[in-house]
Image (spheres, rainbow, N blue to C red):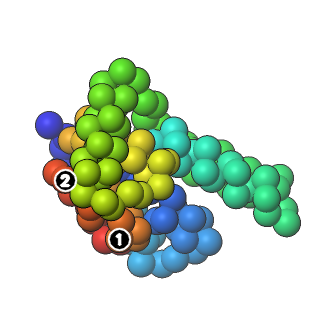
Amino acid sequence: MPASGDILLDSSVVIPFLKGDVTLRANFLASQSLYLPQTVLGELYCGAHLSSQPAKSIAQIENFLAGVILLSPGAVTAEHYGRIRAQLARAGTPIPENDIWIAALALEHQLPLAARDAHFDFVAGLQVKKW
């Protein structure tokens, strides 16, 4: 069971944080441990490479990485992914593939997910913090 204050971060909160969102800064500082899914890291790097200043954006991401714990998917994550995707398909509420992987990591590690995307509410058992 995770310690109080542990949280998994979605790109929907990381990107505004990196852009200087003051409210998010307070939430990040109040958290004990910040976890970043490998999928989110990929999304961040994609955005950096598409930005007008890739080198600056990449440096910002690498600086951010010093303050988080990176989580990578494995076999257990894949089982959660399959269950979530099947449940969403049966309910007729598909969500983006990357977000299913992010939700799977959150469930696997019993971490609440800090996100601003409403579609995470469709994932059964996922605790979402609306930052």
Q: Earlier in the sequence, mark 2 or mark 1?
A: 1
Residue 32 seen from this side: no
Where, quadrant-wise, is the C terminus in this rendering?
A: bottom left
For residue 17, the mark is none
Query: Which residue occupies the extreme top position in the image?
Result: 75
Viewer-side residue, 80 vs 41: 80
Q: State which quadrant residue 92 falls in.
A: bottom left
Q: Are marks 2 and 1 in contact (CB under 8 Å)?
A: no
Residue 51, x across and y down, in percent: 79, 63
Instruction: Identify which residue, 95 or 115, lies in the foreground.
Output: 95
Residue 38, image x, y percentages: 51, 38
In this view, the residue in front, 5 or 100, is 100
Residue 72 placement: quadrant: top left
Instruction: Name the spot of residue 74 as percent of width and height, x first.
Output: 40, 24
Residue named by callout 2? 124
Residue 109 placement, left or right of 102:
left
Q: Amino acid at mark 1?
A: Ala
Q: Label 2: few (<14), some or many (≥20) within 10 Å?
A: few
Residue at 74% x, 56% y: name it: 48
Q: Which residue is mark 1?
A: 118
* Residue 120: image location, x then y, percent: 33, 61
Q: Is residue 50 left or right of residue 79?
A: right
**Relative to the observer, which residue lies in front, 64 or 110?**
110
